[in-house]
Image (cartoon, coloured by chain):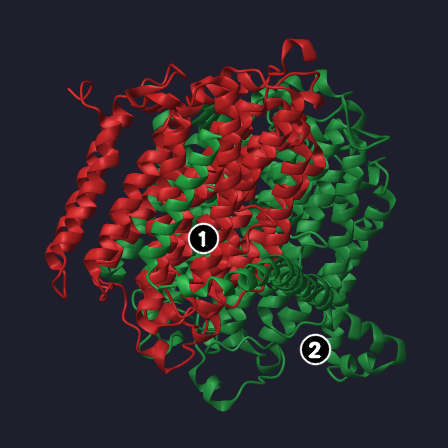
Amino acid sequence: MFADLPLLSLVIWTPIIGGLLVMLTGSGRSGLEAKVLALLVSLLTFVLSIPLYTGFDTATYQMQFTEFVPWIEAFSINYSLGVDGISMPLILLTTFMTVLVVIAGWEVIKNRPAQYMAAFLIMEGLMIGVFAALDAMLFYVFWEAMLIPMFIVIGIWGGDRRVYATLKFFLYTFLGSVFMLIALLWLYFHTDSFAILDFHAVSIPATAQIWIFLAFLIAFAVKVPMWPVHTWLPDAHVQAPTGGSVILAAIMLKLGAYGFLRFSLPIVPDASHTLDWLMIGLSLIAVVYIGFVALVQQDMKKLIAYSSISHMGFVTLGFFIAWRIAEANEGSFTGATMGIEGGVVQMIAHGFVSGAMFLCVGVMYDRLHSREINDYGGVVHRMPKFAGFMVLFAMANAGLPGTAGFVGEFMVILSAFKANFWIAFVAATTLILGAAYTLWMVKRVIYGEVRNKKVAALQDINGREFLFLAILAVMVLGVGLWPAPLLEVMDATVQHLVAHIGVSKLPATAL
Amino acid sequence: MQTITLLIVLAPLLGALIAGLFGGTIGRGGAHTVTTVGVAIAFVLSALVFKQIAIDGAESFNHSVYIWLVSEGIRFEVGFLVDELTAMMMVVVTFVSLMVHIYTIGYMAHDEENWPEGSGAGINSYQRFFSYISLFTFSMLMLVMANNFMQLFFGWEAVGLVSYLLIGFWSVRETAVFANLKAFLVNRVGDFGFLLGIAAVLMHFNTLDYASVFNAVELQKDVTISIWPGSEWNIMTVIAILLFIGAMGKSAQVPLHVWLPDSMEGPTPISALIHAATMVTAGIFMVARMSPIYELSEVALAVVLTIGAITALFMGFLGLVQHDIKRVVAYSTLSQLGYMTVALGASAYAAGVFHLMTHAFFKALLFLAAGSVIIAMHHKQDMREMGGLRKYMPITWLTSLIGSLALIGAPGFSGFFSKDSIIEAVHHSTIPGSGFAYFAVLAGVFITALYSFRMYFLVFHGKERMDEHTRSHLHETPWVVTVPLILLAIPSIFIGGPYVGSMVFGDFFSEAITVAPAHDVLSQVGFTSAMGMIGHGFLTAPFWLAASGVFVAWFLYMRRTDLPAKIVALPVVKQIHWVLVNKYGFDDFNQAVFGGGSRNLGTGLWKVGDVALIDGLLVNGSARLVGMVSAVARHLQSGYLYHYAFAMILGLLALFGLFVVG
């Protein structure tokens, strides 16, 4: 029954149009109508996205739910949409997390709630557009447009240093995407098309591949973010309102990683191969260097932001380990699929876990208006239910088996071991570092004696907070205890990707 | 069989979930009933499984429950393998757990007194405690019943999680929440090696299923792996040592032992269950389970043997200088874990596992008896304030004596059979390091007897050193406490004799444990019968060493109580005593080097790398440059966000147009 509907367009435009409507309703101070409408829109979008999963054919790597409408025919730019086993789960993650963000902002946002909700709905549609676009220009438009609502969310509902943080966020990401635009235009002149799948097929000379790879790298590395272009993220997180942090961590960081899978690896595999040492090196720096930096943070949001960077290191490591595996195993790419799949699982899992961690900090911040670890202590005595959730999510953040946080890291480490003992060795230090920075924070915030009068006056979570934390707890445990369905969805796509990158795309003459 | 195995693991899990999630509704009685019944079901069914496998000779059971995930055609599954080794572990785990459940009803009866007034965490803490110990039982069962490495790791980390939650159970105490963080992190260091070991297994065997891996080890035994250029390592050595690093964390072997003494901050029932009888023996179990791999690497066996010997001897010394009754038992546990590890290194896996079993009973007994003393003493744990408790607490006294005799290996008691088997096995071993190990386990016998009976005399005999208030309230603990003591005392005496013949020297574990003929030391011991072993036992060195240990303890702590202080004041002894009191400096070293070092490194990377170099030089430097340029264009600034956004889109379109037109 859903097959005839343009499902992808629906999940893109429902929240965008809905968001505009929400903005129109929201003149009231409490904005109740706006909030109810926003909740309904986000729920409707989520429901509309479910057939993408139920109707998904896991046997093929081909794009599904495709839509094609000519847009600017002079430059052969088309409104072309479609999803595969990598983008589909990310779209579901987006529609799911947006519902939670709407619930999480319900009572907390007092200042212009309608505009707040609208910004998130519009952002949702634009982010889904990024994941679904099969036309490079369409992708670029969504990619850039998505920045605006996030810019506004941090700039209006952010903390004291929000102007510095927004500018830093904006300049970084904007600068990055300019280089991507140049690469896309080069590819357009090279293929006479803006279809991403045409980019995948065309052969490209070695030098051009390197330049294109670097241009994409700047754009995507900023978003992931990778060391050393990561310093905007802690600032943005610290200043963003809770909802902004959740979407930033859960979805926006994934766009960079998604870019590597959709553009860098399949379009310029030879350059990816040549420069894989750089990617692996930067990933390992993210795991270790950032892990140590996270350890000494005093601000909880900064700590979780650094922990996000560290966890995203596993994603990029999993993506770029393929050629090392082939070199270590007489040209066989067996093991590479597990690395990339591990990276994708880590993207989804990190969406739930980091989102949950930021929501937990938000719950405390709403009560005490502080993110400083030293202002807390003994929270468990006043908020035992909350403490239970927080410890669970902290354990997931530390990669405990049985939680979502474990699956991706496990697969990437197993895969990395096939490539090189020392890569796996360095990556596995996250077992110690991740536990150290997360649980040390838990010790100081949750456990111990009640530190001060403010903590003594804390109230435990209410029904609304219980709801979103419980939903996330179910997801974190669900993915951890039974990740098989998630893997099944992406398996054909990733296998095809590995087969694709194993073949050189250099022009025949250059060989 | 499938239904039974599922019931065995799910009954405690269900109990834990009900007690944990609905503790407020079902109340204290509901919580302890539902969890105790769950564990009792698991115990009865485990006993049934043990009977079928071990006595009726049924085939071992190997079955998968569900597929966790499939990647590259490799199936990661959750499934059960039940053979003789697993069946024995299941009975030990569920039996000790059941005893601890019953005991806890008494021990935690007044837990509200341990919480500050108005603490939300203090509400339903009793129910939560039962939920945790049932959850532990579930996790430990998943660990021992696993049929693959992944589930082993799941159970491995899950018991670590519950241990973390229980050490820090009284979360208001700074020492407790320090100890649980320390325990988790030190264990993570072990798990780091363990996970790499699993990765090495997957890389070379393309499966994590035990049976498939063990079937393939012969074919792979000469494969080498290049760790750094120019050095080739045998793959079995690499796998075995990496896995053993995990065992060193979980089973608290030097230098990863530092967490176990601090774990005594947790309530005593869990010290007995987790930090003596079951969880800490997971490493021993794991190595025995992996015997087909360890047998192929003498290098790995030598490492295991040496680490075990160091732990057995040097941790025993530390037991001599402790005043806290629980810490004496904790160091004793470390030392006994060392004995088990020595057995593994000498390829006497059966003896190691047998000592694991007898130790589980008598050490749980000693801990629970210590807990009984602590209840009577109103939660004072310093032995200097005890003494003469024998006449107030006859059951606790007698069971403690039984436990201590079993621990020092008095002939006839269960510990005698297991410990003597280990000593004899090491004597025949030719693995490098076995000479030192033999010395260590022999010297350890004397030390064990000395610290055990030092504790025994200080607590139950001699002068009553407690204050008058405590003395006037001294009485035997209630039946929920004493009945588990009695039920644990029975196997502490009797479990050794009947089983030593089949389990250690017979073919009881022949399917579960592989021993290469060249390493088969147990067959060289010349065992005849349990009675023969007792008779022979009186003539050997260990007996006389133990006896002299008891005598010295009696002389120093009963006869000449002034002597210990004088001995400690002697010149050289004073220095040694200082070293022992400081636990060889491991804690200070870790605190300074790893704790302080990583904090300094983190601060350095952050302040210098992120803040000064990246942000200060690159980002803000270029921002200042932009700032100077934009100062010219300042009048364009309006302060409205949407103006900026609009300008950005205009700029983009212009850029785009430039490219397309140009």
Give the chain letter for red: A
Q: Is mark 2 on a helix, strand or loop?
A: helix
Residue at 68% across / 16% down in the picture? A331
Residue at 36% across / 31% down in the picture? A138
Q: What residue type is labelled 1?
A: Phe
Q: What residue type is labelled 2?
A: Met
Q: What element carries label 1?
A: helix
Q: Give the label on residue B558, or none.
A: 2
Seen in the image, is B25 located left or right of residue B639?
left
Q: Mark 2 lies on which chain?
A: B
Position of B552 relative to B650 (above/below): below
x then y, percent, for residue A306: 53, 55
Residue to which mark 1 is pinned? A170
Seen in the image, is B441 located left or right of residue A298?
right
x then y, percent, for residue B442: 80, 52
Residue at 54% across / 35% down in the picture? A216
Classed neighbour count for the residue bearing mark 2: other residues with Cα under 10 Å, few (<14), some (14–19), many (≥20): some
Residue at 36% across / 61% down in the picture? A155
x then y, percent, for residue B529: 68, 35
The CA distance from mark 2 to mark 1 is 78 Å
Chain B colour as displayed: green
Which image quarter holds the N terminus of chain A?
top left
